[in-house]
Image (cartoon, rainbow, N blue to C red):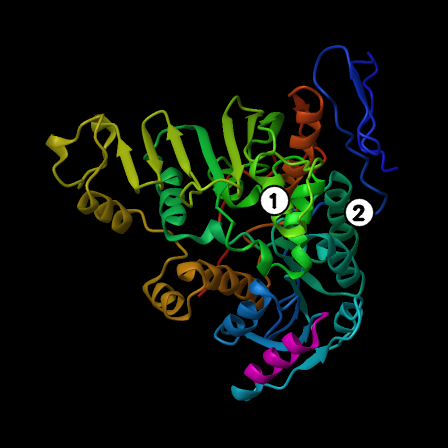
Amino acid sequence: MKKVLYATIAALCIVCTGCGNTSQSSGIIKTDVPERPAGQEDMLGFAADPIEEVGVGVVGLGMRGGDAVQRMTFVPGAKVTAVCDVVPERVEASLGYLSGKGITADGYTGYEEAYKELCEDPDVDLVYICTDWKHHVPVALYAMEHGKHVAIEVPSATTLQECWDLVNTSERTRKHCMVLENCCYDFFELSTLAFAQAGLFGDVIHAEGSYHHNLDEFWDAYWNNWRLDFNRLNRGDVYPTHGFGPVCQVLNIHRGDRLKTLVAMDTDSFNGKKHVEKRTGKPCEDFANGDETMTMIRTELGKSILIEHDVMTPRPYDRMYQIVGTDGYAGKYPVEQVLIRPDTAPEGTPDYDNLNAHVPLSRAQVAVLREKYPSPILTPELVQLAKEVGGHGGMDFIMDYRLIYCLNHGLPLDMDVYDLAEWCSIVELSRISMDNGCAPVEVPDFTRGNWNRIKGFSYAFAEE
């Protein structure tokens, strides 16, 4: 039994995560923050030695991994040196693509732990992990133990124990452990982050994010139906990071503020059971995850976040993404909107005299703000290349480009292991809250007290 939660001295609650039995009298459910092992240091602002050409080994060549192999061939300073999958045909397909571009790489396949050979390959500097969710952490831990940096698809971890294992291993081995959260590189999210950092919204006090994506047409595309099985066996927001990651950056989480308390709620399973019954022909009585989950989080500085998850109902795709400030607002869905108070509009805003506190800015006005307050990442050259290469409109390529750029130049990554742990901890924390009558749960401080040492989220760049 993995012991993750502990009763407070006042015996406010007792939670057994292994069996799911709980008893609680009052108060907040506390989470354990283990002491940092002797000899370890935090990874805040960590920069590894520069790597002139990053040898990339991709593990998992399904929907995400196969595309990643192709994108990496367009990233300056990167070379795919190895690929791995349990399905030999996928390995052959990726090797064939690379060969067609004049790239020679090693292929590992044939058994479930073939990834170990890739992690031991001396030509691999970065292990890029795109497997099913349950293999994310085992591959990452083995890779870091064998001297490799790792980048892990989302959710990179699904339990608190896995989050702590990744944090401790990254700290001990001094290897980067990055969450591959592509939505942090969406053009709108990048622009509104720049607006927020310029103060256009005043003090950002609330944010919302979600993953609303009807997967009716996609369940069978996942190898051995692993994603539907995961939802059947696990309750909670099992896929939080697309909505959560970008708003955490705006709120400077563990860079001046921290996640403090969480409350979660869900519906019963309605469509989930139907999906299982359709595929098995048998009644389904044990589908753990609700069709809709809602998680509310309060920060140390008194700000709030709402995160939702729904992959079961026929609602339009929506990451919700809303930023609410004392002087402004930005939202991406169902249409992109930016609003700022007329009396705080910066000089040069078009139609300044016609600004209305109840009406979003026009496209022309937003375009002027983007020119005046550009994202430091979105250079014209990178935007053009990203749109040509693609990957969810280009944000996948920008994510890969930034990862390799930072490794090439020995810079801190845009997303560190604490981002990974904080964003992914919502999976189990939301379940704990739901299992205990939607009780408040403490969010552990994965930095172990150093959440306020760095002031403000920022991107690192090499000196010209």
- In the image, what residue type sits under mark 1? Asp
Q: CA distance from mark 1 to mark 2?
A: 18 Å
Residue of label 2: 40
Taking the spot 68% from the left edge, 38% from the top edge, the residue there is: 287
As drawn, 117 above or below 31: below
- In the image, what residue type sits under mark 2? Gln
Residue of label 1: 419
Q: Position of residue 130 (x, y in %)?
A: 63, 61
Q: Let me know if residue 459 appears in the view.
A: no
- Which of discs 1 and 2 lies nearer the camera? The answer is 1
Secondary structure mostly seen in magenta is helix
Q: Position of residue 318 (x, y in %)?
A: 42, 43
Tell me, yes or no, whether the highlighted magenta stretch contains residue 158: no
Q: Position of residue 263 (x, y in %)?
A: 61, 24
Q: How many marks?
A: 2
Q: Position of residue 414 (x, y in %)?
A: 54, 52
**Mark 1 touching mark 2, by CB under 8 A?**
no
Taking the spot 66% from the left edge, 55% from the top edge, the residue there is: 225
| Part of the protein shown in magenta | 86-98
Q: Secondary structure at mark 1?
A: helix
Taking the spot 36% from the left edge, 65% from the top edge, the residue there is: 387
